[in-house]
Image (spheres, rainbow, N blue to C red):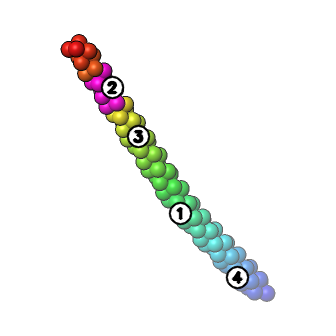
Amino acid sequence: MNMNSLSLSLSLSLLRERERERERERERRERAERDREREKRERRESGERERESEREISSLSLSLSLSLSLSLSLYLSLSLSLSLSLSKTNQYKGA
């Protein structure tokens, strides 16, 4: 009887150990799945930040181009106005 009790105790210990090992394996799988999901989310968020940065750069570039175009237009307009003004002044002096 003592031998049966020892055998039963050993069997129960082995079963508990197998159950603990299954639990550890399940936890490892869950942790690995959470890690994969986190990495996917981080890559997606990183891509979104990169696209947002590209849009901001494009917008700033467009604003700068517009600003330069307007400045050049203003400069040319003022130059033309000054040139016409000087031309009229020279005509009056010559007359």
Q: What is the crowding at mark 3: few (fewer than 14 residues within 10 Å), some, or many (at least 20)?
A: few
Tag 2 near tag 3, CB within 8 Å = no
Mark with earlier residue (4, 1): 4
Mark with earlier residue (1, 3): 1
Image position of 84 with respect to 40: above or below: above
- Kind of residue indicated by mark 2: Ser
Q: Residue furthest top?
A: 93
Query: Which residue, given by chain and number where applicable, does mark 3 sit on?
Result: 66
* Residue 46 relative to residue 95: left or right: right
- Kind of residue indicated by mark 3: Leu
Mark with earlier residue (2, 1): 1
Query: Which residue, given by chain and number where applicable, does mark 4 sit on?
Result: 11
Residue 21, given in percent of the width and then of the height, sits at 63, 73
Which residues are the magenta region? 76-85
Mark with earlier residue (4, 3): 4
- Kind of residue indicated by mark 1: Lys
Along the line of sight, which residue is nearer the eye, 78 or 85?
85
